[in-house]
Amino acid sequence: MSSLREMESTVRNKQVILRDYIKGFPKESDLMIIEVANAVELKVKAGSKDILVKNLYLSCDPYMGILMREPNPSTSALMDAFVPGKPISGYGVSRVIDSDDPTFTKGDFVCGMVDWEEYSTINPTSSFKIDVNINVPLSYYTGILGMTGLTAYVGFYEICSAKKGETVFVSAASGAVGQLVGQFAKLMGCYVVGSAGSKQKVDLLLNKLGFDDAFNYKEEPNLDSALKRCFPKGIDIYFENVGGKMLDAVLLNIKTYGRIAVCGMISQYHLETREGIQNLPVVIYKKIKMQGFVAIDFIDTFPKFLEFVLPYIKERKLIYVEDIVEGLENGPAALAGLFRGQNFGKQVLKVARE
């Protein structure tokens, strides 16, 4: 009987571990799955204010590749780097198993930062309780209703101060953030063009997400010419996700007083020698506003963002494309695949059933 009670009160826990700091682009082999030697108690310590959660969905995001590299002053300003031999972490959706915080009770669904593992004990101060009365997939809280959605909202509305009728260019437009920026722009009455890395992704932009035009950057011999074709009168707003040659071409085609929201530069993160930007003086001559940002700095706007986005979701005026991979053991491949453009939409790892 004692062994049966022990089985009921503890579980084994699997984790995704960083083998060592990486050089170059992340590979599946840079991560490994382990089973933790000590079983997890399905109860938190009294007085700890912690909650124990079972992780259901984990978000795969490009910034996680930066955190797999040896820390330096420029990257440590973003977040603490992952530690070799320890689990990586990211944004996730979880179910509460036990709680010592009166705000959360067993069975609640929460979203926030967790380690990549099956079960996590967390301090819930940075977690949000999910309102189950909102009839959307729980996976949405890793994306459109999480930091991804907030990133698109803040960059487009807060930083770029978009106006009806403006011209908008979005790079990596079929990705987690880009697909939302394009749709936000269309809802506002803007002319929107996106770039992506395959015919399938370009078709998604044109035929499902409602972009006015789109092109496969891999098939364009000259990005400057491609942008001049799509924007004969120039670009008002550029939502930057890739950097490098694309940013250089945009600077030649952006209008005076144009705005650039710098969300990411995935083409540059893992190059040993990063590409130089030749046309940066344009920022001066054209009086361009160019601002980098991370969503967490705008967390106070999250309630305002939800108030804005939820009606559009309910009215089916927003489409959100997810690429869901099942099983923690498939997490390393899913994360590494981001950097080769293998994902189609927002990459999500499903760890367990709801």
Image (cartoon, grey):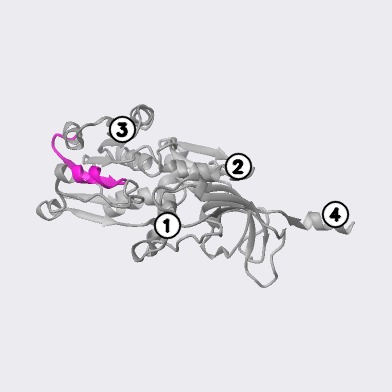
Q: Residues within 10 Å of mark 1 (few under 14, many from 20)?
A: many
Q: CA distance from mark 1 to mark 3?
A: 35 Å
Mark 3 is surrounded, within 10 Å at the Cα level, by few (under 14), some (14 to 19) or many (20 or more) other residues, namely: many
Residue at 50%, 50% in the rendered image: 30
Distance between the Cα atoms at labels 4 and 2?
Answer: 27 Å
- Quarter of the rendering containing residue 85: bottom right
- For the question of whether residue 255 can be seen, the reply is yes
* Spot occupied by residue 232 in the image (x, y as percentages of width and height): 14, 34
Counting residues from the start of the chain, the first of labels 1 and 3 encountered is: 1
Above or below, comparing residue 291 to residue 144 in the picture: below
**Residue indicated by mark 3:** 211
Q: Which amino acid, mark 3?
A: Phe
Q: Which residue is mark 2?
A: 327
* Picture mark count: 4
- Three-letter code, disc 1: Arg
Q: Which residue is mark 4?
A: 4
Tell me which numbered mark, 4 or 2, is placed earlier along the sequence: 4
Residue at numbered disc 1 = 69
In whole angstroms, how far apart are the C-alphas of marks 4 and 1? 44 Å
* Callout 1 secondary element: loop
**Does the magenta-highlighted stretch encompass residue 102?**
no
Q: Quadrant of the C terminus?
A: top right
Magenta span = 231-250
Mark 4 closeness class: few <14, some 14–19, many ≥20 residues within 10 Å: few
On screen, residue 5 versus residue 333, left or right, reads right
Among the two numbered marks 4 and 1 on one chain, the one whose residue lies closer to the N terminus:
4
Q: Secondary structure at mark 2?
A: loop
Near-viewer residue (334 or 317): 334
Give amino acid for label 2: Gly
